[in-house]
Image (cartoon, rainbow, N blue to C red):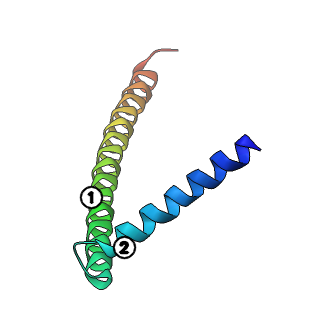
Amino acid sequence: MKANKIALGVLGAIATGAVLGILFAPAKGADTRKKILRKGNNYADDLKDKFENISGTLKSNYEKMFHEGKSKLDNLKNELKNSSI
């Protein structure tokens, strides 16, 4: 019985807080939604920039490793060609 009263009190407090939050909100709902949308777009742009930066770094590292490996393979081919085996 005591747990029921506590749960009912918590739910009542949550509902009261939500109603008071809506009543005393500093901006209209449309303005708040626009702010949330702008903030979400900013986060998406930041995430896109970070992804592009990481992708560019990975591509650069891949190209460097590829050229180093190709150079080593070419050197090995030349050594085998010039060896007297």
Report the amino acid beneath label 1. Answer: Asp
Mark 1 vs 2: CB contact within 8 A: no
Image: 73 above or below 10: above
Q: Position of residue 23 (x, y in %)?
A: 33, 75
Instruction: Return the residue at label 2.
Output: 22
Report the amino acid beneath label 2. Answer: Ile
Q: Nearer the viewer, residue 30 or 36?
A: 30
Residue at the extreme left: 26
Image: 39 above or below 54: below
Q: Position of residue 61 (x, y in %)?
A: 33, 39
Residue sitting at x 27%, y 82%: 28
Q: Position of residue 6 (x, y in %)?
A: 64, 46
Res. 75 mark: none
Marks 1/2: CA distance? 30 Å
Residue sitting at x 57%, y 51%: 10
Q: Earlier in the sequence, mark 1 or mark 2?
A: 2
Q: Nearer the viewer, residue 1 or 77?
A: 1
Q: Position of residue 77 (x, y in %)?
A: 44, 29
Image: 72 above or below 27: above
Q: Nearer the viewer, residue 64 or 82?
A: 64
Looking at the rendered structure, the secondary structure element under dot 2 is helix
Q: How many marks overall?
A: 2
Looking at the rendered structure, the secondary structure element under dot 1 is helix
Q: Nearer the viewer, residue 71 or 55?
A: 55
Front position among marks 1 and 2: 2
Q: Quadrant of residue 51?
A: bottom left
Q: Quadrant of the N terminus?
A: top right
Q: Quadrant of residue 26?
A: bottom left
Instruction: Return the residue at label 1.
Output: 46
Residue at the extreme right: 1
